[in-house]
Image: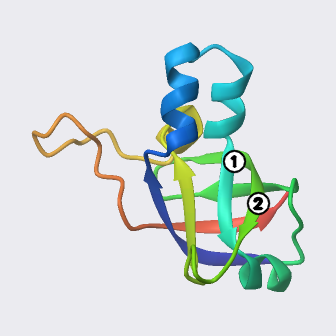
Amino acid sequence: MVETMILVPGRSQKQGTSLVAGKLKDEYKRVTSTAELNEKDMRRLKLKDGDKIRLKSDVGQTVVTCIAKKDADLPSGMIFIPYGPPSSELMAHDTAGSGMPLSKHMEVKVSKV
């Protein structure tokens, strides 16, 4: 099953603290390779914590691990992923002069790997 959802990459506390240790360290790679989905979306897509999913945008695609979040933490239809190499695979290179890629509110196709 493939479904279109809204991806919102951003900073997280774990991403920030693991970045201090180094981008080549396992903790940073794990944190930036983990997407958060609403628990209802996970059930509908027949996913469980730790499953691998493919995220595909108009620009590229990546495979990450998924974990469930409650309704109060993440609305249905949205995915959160910390900034890192996997999320960068989905973003266009244009920064509109800001130095930061346009990354908010991206449509992605989600499928179980």
- Say above or below: 67 vs 10: below
Other residues around mark 1 within 10 Å, as few (<14) / some (14–19) / many (≥20): many
Give the residue at mark 2: 67
Give the residue at mark 1: 34
Q: Which residue corresponds to the image point at 75% horizontal and 78% vertical from the top-left?
A: 39
Q: Which residue corresponds to the image point at 54% horizontal and 36% vertical from the top-left?
A: 15
Q: Position of residue 25 (x, y in %)?
A: 67, 15
Q: Position of residue 11 (x, y in %)?
A: 43, 45
Q: Nearer the viewer, residue 94 or 39?
A: 39
- Say above or below: 47 vs 65: below
State the CA–CA distance, disc 2 to disc 1.
7 Å
Res. 22 visible in picture: no
Q: Which residue corresponds to the image point at 21% horizontal and 42% vertical from the top-left?
A: 95
At mark 2, the secondary structure is: strand
State yes or no: discs 2 and 1 in contact (Cβ < 8 Å). Answer: yes
- Say above or below: 61 vs 5: above
